[in-house]
């Protein structure tokens, strides 16, 4: 530890900040449906998720995976390139958090790495084919795979359980949701904390503090685990609200189907060699489950905004990272400028977010525009060929929310 | 540029089967538990055993999931 330079320390701190944003961004994946159906209270849900993320972080340390998964040529990566990449990823995470849209932190990090590498080593260092196979195709496949599974599972559970009383089965579905949410949190902690550990280790190797190919030191594991757990506990309530209520309305049966589908896809994809993003899978599962109930609707305007955010992730994070790298390349003062820029932008985003506070007290209220949106084309088409709803959602889309004061439109 | 369609296909297939099977099992378990409250005598016992069997399978699946995460 004796030769850690200031630059290296800045990189490590920034990596932990990214880990923290990763935590609160992805709480929604595991917990949104559990919270929105009332299976768990908001605070207990994020507490459980935080603990499981922490446990997951300690469970397995795979150093073999390269950070960028082959996206860029990693031989030329220096600490300030990593710093620039993290700046891009963090700012994208914060922006999407501000507007409450689920987006993949992993893709943000990849985008940041690509942008920073391009600015430092040119386009030739980027492996275009890998971008397609590791980023584009998974982004399309994940929601489809998870969504189709969730839709069939939801249809099936309604069909099997059609003669039962909702009140009696609610407790059972609650238990199921908590179990599958726990599994997703555990998997998330294992996968995502490792990314940060890998980045910090990469920075340490680049700074000649540890030997190449060595396991992350214990303090790296502990700090990465704590950062992601803390972020998870503080909870991205805005994103939880979008995923739990903004995309569709879920009954416990659908919540359970969605979580199980997401968990299966996450575990299958990480073990069968075609890695898919947790966020994309969970969002897709929620939408699929929404369509699995007769008369269930998906709010396609919100979904479209989310898809657009997914598409913009790589370019946006990449652009910010490239600009940051361009500045940091100029010298030490460049690093200082970018660091100040990061802190100032984060502060600005946080200040804007305080105008419309979403926390555990109002996370289950419908967000802006959800009550009075006219059904879209796809929803109308689906509704035309399915019978009218058998059961009512907790907050039917057709009636305007009674006690909602007019809320300002989202950015 | 090599896309591993086989892997993607297997992810799709495995997760679809796993999801549907798990959800079905769990639903059957829940229904078994609620039925045993309204059934009487041997009907209740059958429903309860069936429910527990379903839940046991679910627990096994979750344990397998944890195993996959840890290993």
Image (cartoon, coloured by chain):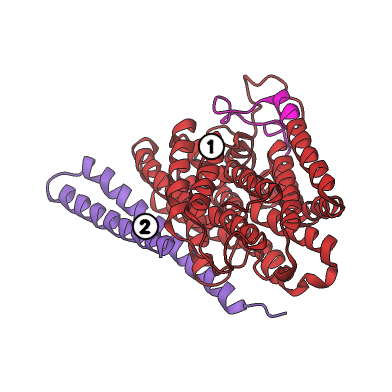
Relative to A356, does residue A211 appear above or below in the rendering?
Answer: below
Among the 4 quarters of the image, the one containing residue A142: bottom right
Label 2 neighbourhood size at 10 Å, few (<14), some (14-19), many (20+)?
A: some
Magenta portion: prevailing SS class: loop
> Could you tell me which secondary element the residue under label 1 belongs to?
loop
Residue A358, numbered circle: none
Among the 4 quarters of the image, the one containing residue A119: bottom right
Relative to A296, does residue A59 appear above or below in the rendering?
Answer: below
Name the residue tied to disc 1.
A393
> Could you tell me which secondary element the residue under label 2 belongs to?
helix
The total number of labels drawn is 2
Chain seen in red: A
Q: Position of residue A278 (x, y in %)?
A: 57, 55
Q: Nearer the viewer, residue B49 or A190?
A: A190
Q: Are discs 1 and 2 less than 8 Å apart at CB?
A: no
Q: Position of residue A286 (x, y in %)?
A: 57, 49
- Give me the residue at 57% from left, 79% from top: B6
Task: Say if the magenta span includes residue A372.
Answer: yes
What residue range appears in magenta? A350-374
Among the 4 quarters of the image, the one containing residue B60: bottom left
Q: Does any portion of residue A128 appear in the rendered image?
A: yes
Q: Is the same chain shared between marks 1 and 2? A: no
Q: Position of residue A259 (x, y in %)?
A: 49, 50
Chain seen in purple: B
Give the position of the C terminus of chain A as an image quadrant.
Answer: top right
Q: Chain of mark 2?
A: B
Q: Nearer the viewer, residue A85 or A308?
A: A85
Q: Does any portion of residue A41 appear in the rendered image?
A: no
- Give me the residue at 15% from left, 50% from top: B45
Residue B62, numbered circle: 2
């Amino acid at each position: 530890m004796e030769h850690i330079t200031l630059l290296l320390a800045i990189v490590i701190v920034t990596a932990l900040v990214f880990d923290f944003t990763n935590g609160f961004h992805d709480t929604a994946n595991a917990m949104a449906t559990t919270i929105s159906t009332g299976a768990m209270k908001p605070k207990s849900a994020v507490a459980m998720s935080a603990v499981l993320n922490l446990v997951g972080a300690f469970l397995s340390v795979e150093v073999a995976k390269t950070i960028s998964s082959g996206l860029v040529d990693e031989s030329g990566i220096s600490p300030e390139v990593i710093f620039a990449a993290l700046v891009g990823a963090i700012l994208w995470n914060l922006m999407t958090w501000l507007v409450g849209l689920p987006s993949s932190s992993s893709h943000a990090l990849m985008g940041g790495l690509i942008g920073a590498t391009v600015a430092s080593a040119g386009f030739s260092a980027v492996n275009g084919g890998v971008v397609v196979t590791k980023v584009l195709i998974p982004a399309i496949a994940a929601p489809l795979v998870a969504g189709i599974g969730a839709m069939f599972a939801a249809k099936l559970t309604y069909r099997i359980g059609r003669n039962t009383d909702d009140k009696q089965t609610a407790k059972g579905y609650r238990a199921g949701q908590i179990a599958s949410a726990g599994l997703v949190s555990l998997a998330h902690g294992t996968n995502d904390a490792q990314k940060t550990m890998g980045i910090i280790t990469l920075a340490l190797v680049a700074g000649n503090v540890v030997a190449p190919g060595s396991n992350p030191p214990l303090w790296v594991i502990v700090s990465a685990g704590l950062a992601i757990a803390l972020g998870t506990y503080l909870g991205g309530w805005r994103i939880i609200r979008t995923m739990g209520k903004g995309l569709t309305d879920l009954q416990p049966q659908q919540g359970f189907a969605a979580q199980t589908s997401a968990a299966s896809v996450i575990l299958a994809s990480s073990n069968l060699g075609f890695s898919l993003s947790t966020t994309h899978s969970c969002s897709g599962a929620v939408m699929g489950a929404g369509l699995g109930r007769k008369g269930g609707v998906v709010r396609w305007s919100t979904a479209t905004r989310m898809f657009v955010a997914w598409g913009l992730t790589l370019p946006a994070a990449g652009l910010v990272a490239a600009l940051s790298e361009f500045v940091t390349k100029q010298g030490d003062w460049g690093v200082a400028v970018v660091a100040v820029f990061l802190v100032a932008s984060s502060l600005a985003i946080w200040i804007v977010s305080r105008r419309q506070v979403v926390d555990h007290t109002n996370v289950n209220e419908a967000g802006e525009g959800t009550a009075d949106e006219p059904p879209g084309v796809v929803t109308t088409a689906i509704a035309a060929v399915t019978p009218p709803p058998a059961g009512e959602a907790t907050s039917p889309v057709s009636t305007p929310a009674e006690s909602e004061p007019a809320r300002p439109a989202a950015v | 540029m090599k896309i591993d369609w086989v892997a993607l296909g297997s992810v799709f297939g495995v997760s679809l089967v796993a999801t549907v099977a798990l959800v079905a099992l769990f639903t059957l378990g829940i229904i078994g538990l609620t039925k045993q409250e309204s059934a009487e005598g041997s009907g209740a016992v059958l429903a309860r055993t069936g429910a527990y069997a379903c839940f046991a399978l679910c627990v096994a699946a979750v344990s397998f999931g944890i195993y996959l995460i840890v290993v």
